[in-house]
Image: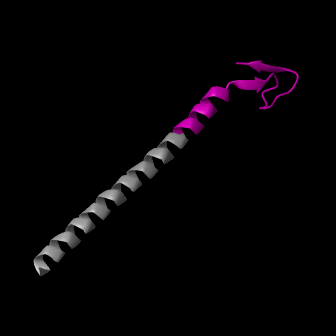
């Protein structure tokens, strides 16, 4: 009987480790996706400048 409880405890512990690893991977994936989206946003808008070289949305904005 004690052996059965020990086996159940080990399987529950292993199951929790797997679930924890899954959550960690999911969290890392979401973080990486967010960083990629932010980088894409920066790449999309870096080329919009004013004619005087400043960044902004003035009357003389042009695409370089």
The residue lying at 11 percent from left, 77 percent from top is 3
Q: What percent of the width, then of the height, locates residue 33?
A: 50, 40
Q: What percent of the width, then of the height, locates residue 37?
A: 56, 36
Using the image as rendered, state which of residue 44 and residue 14 is in the foreground.
14
Q: Is residue 1 left or right of residue 63?
A: left
Query: What is the quadrant of the N terminus in the image?
Result: bottom left
| Magenta-drawn stretch contains 1 | no
Image quadrant in which you'd find residue 63: top right
Q: Which residue is at the far front?
A: 1
> In the rendered image, is residue 57 in sight?
yes
Residues drawn in magenta:
36-64
Query: What is the quadrant of the C terminus in the image?
Result: top right
Q: What percent of the width, then of the height, locates residue 57?
A: 82, 28
The residue lying at 77 percent from left, 32 percent from top is 55
* Figure colour scheme: one colour
Using the image as rendered, state which of residue 32 and residue 50 is in the foreground.
32
Q: Is residue 47 left or right of residue 39?
A: right
Using the image as rendered, state which of residue 36 and residue 43 is in the foreground.
36
Q: Which residue is at the far top?
A: 63
The residue lying at 40 percent from left, 55 percent from top is 23
| Magenta-drawn stretch contains 52 | yes
Residue 55 to residue 19: above or below: above
> In the rendered image, is residue 46 in sight?
no
Q: Is residue 24 left or right of residue 7?
A: right
Q: How many marks?
A: 0
Q: Is residue 20 left or right of residue 54?
A: left
Image quadrant in which you'd find residue 24: bottom left
Q: Which residue is at the far bottom?
A: 2
The residue lying at 22 percent from left, 72 percent from top is 9
């Amino acid at each position: 009987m004690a052996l059965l409880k020990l086996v159940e405890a080990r399987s529950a512990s292993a199951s929790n480790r797997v679930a924890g690893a899954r959550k960690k991977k999911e969290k890392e994936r979401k973080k990486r996706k967010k960083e990629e989206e932010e980088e894409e946003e920066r790449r999309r808008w870096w080329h919009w400048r004013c004619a005087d070289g400043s960044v902004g949305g003035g009357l003389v904005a042009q695409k370089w």
